[in-house]
Image (cartoon, grey):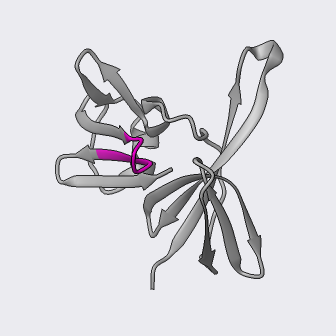
Amino acid sequence: MKTLLFVRVACLTGALAAASLSSADILYDGNKAKALGRRAEIVDGTIHWTYCNGTKEDFKKPPYRVEEGENCRLEPSIFGIAKDVDHFVVSDVERFKKFLPDANAKEGDTVAFTVNKSNTTVSIGYKQNSATIRY
């Protein structure tokens, strides 16, 4: 049986004076992030999930937790990654480990990062560890 967790993610967008609050969730399967989405509702033990692209899916009775973070903007910084000339590196180890918890990456380590718009996934890789996260 798979264990699914949620992490509520919130972000301020726009200029400080005109900032608006937007939010999304991260769907976890065990300790690995599997999807980014918006405003998951839990009704009678069923999670009604909406991916960032608007697609909906239901998940039955997972244990979940909620914490603040970023939203559906698909920028490398959301995943603890930064662009460094012609490759990507870990810029925030704590945030990076939310997506690849078993990776022993350190700040500055080179990682793979790809956004695939045709199948609405983000792929992150470090050595033998990888994750594909649907949005």
What x and y, as percent, mark residue 113? 31, 37
> Would residue 33 appear left or right of 102 to someone viewing this image?
right
Between 36 and 66, the one lying in front of the other is 36
What x and y, as percent, mark residue 73? 56, 34
Q: Which residues are magenta?
A: 116-124
Magenta stretch: residue 118 in it? yes
Magenta stretch: residue 115 in it? no
The answer to whether residue 99 is seen in the rendering is yes
Locate residue 12: give its quadrant.
Answer: top right
Locate residue 80: give its quadrant.
Answer: top left
Residue at figure coordinates x 74%, y 70% from the top left: 42
Where is 115 relative to 99, above or below? Answer: above
Where is 76 relative to 44, above or below? Answer: above
Which residue ends up furthest to the bottom in the rendered image? Answer: 1
The answer to whether residue 63 is seen in the rendering is no
> Would residue 61 appear left or right of 81 to someone viewing this image?
right
> Would residue 108 appear left or right of 92 to someone viewing this image?
left
Residue at figure coordinates x 76%, y 15% from the top left: 16
What x and y, as percent, mark residue 108? 27, 27
Residue at figure coordinates x 32%, y 38% from the top left: 114
> Would residue 119 appear left or right of 19 to someone viewing this image?
left
Between 98 and 73, the one lying in front of the other is 73
Which residue ends up furthest to the front in the rendered image? Answer: 118
Q: Disc count in the image?
A: 0
Which residue ends up furthest to the left in the rendered image? Answer: 127
What x and y, as percent, mark residue 129? 24, 54
Residue at figure coordinates x 77%, y 82% from the top left: 44
Q: Where, quadrant-wise, is the N terminus in this rendering?
A: bottom left
Which residue ends up furthest to the right in the rendered image? Answer: 17
